[in-house]
Amino acid sequence: MRILHLDRSEFFQKVIKKGSDLQNEQIFGCSSIKEAREILDREDIELILTGHELEDGSSEFFLRELGDSAYKDIPVIMLSSADTIEARRTYFELGVIDIIPKNGFTLDKLNEHIHNIRRKDALTEKMREASFAVVDDSHFILKVIRNILAFQNITHLDLYSDPQELIDSGKKYDIYMIDMVLPRISGKQLVMRLRNENPLSVIIVISSLESRKSILNVMESGADDYILKPFDSEVLTARLKSSFRHFLVMKELEEKRSEMEKLAVTDPLTGVSNRRHVLELLRKEIFLAEEKGTPLSVMLIDIDKFKRVNDTYGHDKGDRILQEICRLFHDKCSESDIFGRYGGEEFLFVMPGLPLDKAKEKTERIRDRFSRLAFPDIDSGLRMSFSGGLVEWKGDDPAKLLQRADNLMYEAKEGGRNNIRG
């Protein structure tokens, strides 16, 4: 790491330089603001360490100048002999990401501090991909948190001084950091709303309220953690990582649950709904058609001479035919249509809102398209077709509806195949 160390103290210059040699850091030391400017213009600095007292001015002057320059995004750590609440507020306002007191200073403290912030472990890398929202009516706190997160290379960050702005944005975030005392809406109310809308997101409350009752109330409303102000970067980062680790675990469990649910209703070969699911969806559409008084058409499909494909070319080529007919129907279906594998080479096509004549026009176009598909990877001369039985729901139950469709499909097969009866 290329570090600019700005300090009037020759003792601290030597201490930092000696320690950096052991850690393989590249230190550019100086004692004046003028020298610091020259180094910044010449070198690609990644971190700035600065003391309070400098040869040609104060660190406050240097930090203000830095904030208006092209180097404003370089993280700054203050090595200070004046570690008071007032000093911290001043330095944080000027963009410092953390303060290390000179009293009791050791190289181990500095190296551990830099290592903990900059290390690129798997958790940190994932956290850099996450989206953050910080809500606090204090611009000082917003700036402090922004600086701390920026030093972690976290850039997917939005800052809100008014909670209503967050609500109105309609945006969803992986991680929320929220003050307890906010204008127009309390932190607790905001937490409850966000938790209801984002069950898996990390919600951390940052507040100066120390009462046990306040902490319990906000935790019960849905917050994952509660951090008291004032805080330092190491504590905030550690607590943030702990909550984010839990977020990743819960997200993985949710993804696995969704995957299992999908597998339970999906035909593994073709990716369309399996028999159980497509029949369940049919029952729901019949209920809706009866309730709304809208038409509903259903077609039962059978691929013609499919057994001959399996016997001639093998079952893997037969699978290819099944997948191709599913892709075709997927492309030609509307959002409300339902298509699923009924069994073997049979499929069920449900068309909510379509009367029989409109359904016939639609399915004939698909039948014609399928009959003209070529399968050069199987046989350049191979052409396939399907026969279908098309019916409109007339108040009968699913079993009778499907029986009517099956009878018509049988007529289509007996009548020469590659046609739709209905």
Image: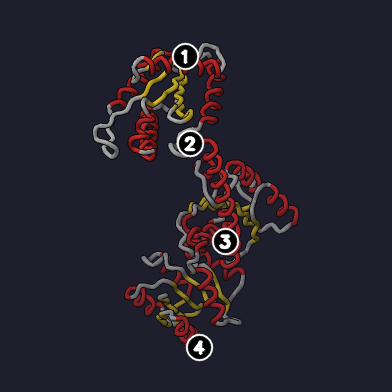
Q: Residue 241: which numbered mark, if any?
A: 3
Q: Which residue is mark 1?
A: 392
For the image, the number of numbered tags is 4
**CA separation, marks 4 and 3?**
36 Å
Q: Secondary structure at mark 4?
A: helix
In the image, what residue type sits under mark 4?
Phe
Instruction: Name the residue at 53% across, 22% down.
Output: 285
- In the image as oriented, which residue stretches furthest toward the top? 394
Q: Mark 4 or mark 1: which comes first in sequence?
A: 4
Q: Secondary structure at mark 1?
A: strand
**CA separation, marks 1 and 3?**
58 Å
In the image, what residue type sits under mark 3?
Lys
Q: Secondary structure at mark 3?
A: helix
Q: Is residue 389 above or below residue 380?
A: above
Q: Which residue is mark 4?
A: 11
**CA separation, marks 1 and 2?**
26 Å
Marks 4 and 3: which is nearer the front? 3
Q: Are marks 1 and 3 in contact (CB under 8 Å)?
A: no
